Image: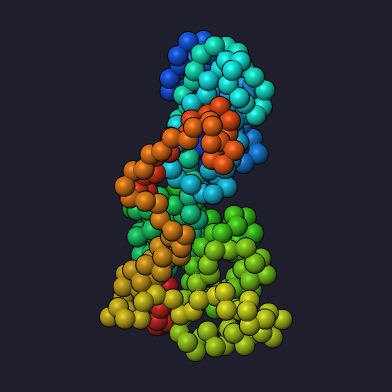
Amino acid sequence: MDWLDALAQLRREGAAGVLVTVIEVRGHAPRDTGAKMLVGTEQTWGSVGGGNLEETAIRRARDLIATRSSATEVLESRLNEHARHQHGRQCCGGEVRMLLEPFPARPVVAIFGMGHVGFELARILSRLEIRLDLVDSRAEQLDQLRLADITAGSADVTVHRAVVGELVLERLPAGAHLVIMTHDHAEDFALCDAAIRADRFGSIGLIGSRTKWARFRRHLAEAGHSDVAINTITSPIGLPELPGKEPAVIAVGVAAQLIAAMAARPPSDIEPRRHTVSPLHEAQSGPEGLDVERVTAGPQAGEGPNPR
C-alpha cells in the first residue's frame, strides 16, 4: 500500500497520521526532494531515506500524534560525521529538510435515528470536517436521494441500515460522540445501556423529555449502572433557550452542543508561530542533530408526538 492509500485508510478508520515530505536537499542525501513517508501510530508507509534521518522523523511524527498537534513542523538533519544523532550516523555529506504535516483523526459523530430531527442534524454536521455515521433500521430514512444533500458535504458519511443499532455502536472508535434519537424508546434504551457499558465514548446524548429521561434513569439503575455511569448521558439535549420545537431548531441546539464537545481541548493558536531549536539545546528541546521549525496554524430537546 502506498502512502496515499494508507492516508485514506487512516481517515476511514478514524486514526491520525503525519505525512513527512523531503522539501529540500543540499549536497548528497539518501532521497530526493519530494520523497514522502506516512507515519501512523504503529506503521509507516514509504521512506524518506532510512537511518537516523528517518527514525528521528518517525519519532517526532508520533510525538505529534500523541499530543494531537495540528502544527506543521520542518526538521533539518545534517548528514555528516560531526553531527550528533540518536539513531546512528549518516555520512552522506548533505543536509535534508523535511516537512511534517499532521493529519489529526477526524471527530466521529454517530446519529442513531434519521427521522426529522436526525435528518436536520445530519445536514448541519455534514458541513464540518468530521466522520458522520448515520444509523437507522428503516430503509426509507436512508434513501440515497433523501441523503444527497448530506453526502455532498465535507463530512465523511457512512450509512448503516441496522435493525440492531448496538452492532454499529460496537464498531465505532473510542471517543466517538453518540446522538440517540430513534423512533423506538426500547431501541433508545438498548443503545444507552450498551453505550454506558462500552465506557469509551466522547459523549452520549439522548433526545426526549425530562419525563422520558427520569424513566430511563430508573431503568438504567435497575440494570446495574451507577449514578456516575448514568450521568455520562446528557438528556434532554439541545439548547432550551432556543424558541420553537421545529426539527431544524432542535437540530441547531444539538449541533451546537456537539461542536462544543468536539472542541473540548484548547484550540491551536490563530497566529502562526515559528521557532528554531539548536542541537546544542536539544537535550531539553528536541532530537540531536535537528533543527525544528514549528508552524502552528489556526483551528482547522423536546419530545413531541414522534418528532423523529
Depth check, front residue: 227 or 85: 85
Q: Is residue 141 above or below residue 58?
A: below
- Say which quarter of the image contains residue 241: bottom left
Q: Position of residue 224 (x, y in %)?
A: 72, 81
Q: Position of residue 239 (x, y in %)?
A: 36, 77
Q: Position of residue 200 (x, y in %)?
A: 62, 63
Picture residue at 64% right of the left edge, 35% below the top: 43
> Number of marks in the image?
0
Q: Is residue 169 above or below residue 184?
A: above
Tell me: 244 left or right of 301.
left
Depth check, front residue: 66 or 290: 290
Picture residue at 54% right of the left edge, 40% below the top: 285
Tell me, yes or no, if residue 57 can be seen here: no
Q: Position of residue 47 (x, y in %)?
A: 58, 23
Tell me: 4 left or right of 89.
left
Q: Quadrant of the C terminus?
A: bottom left
Q: Quadrant of the N terminus?
A: top right
Picture residue at 27% right of the left edge, 80% below the top: 243
Depth check, front residue: 68 or 243: 68
- Say which quarter of the image contains residue 114: bottom left
> Residue pushed farthest front?
280
Tell me, yes or no, if residue 243 can be seen here: yes
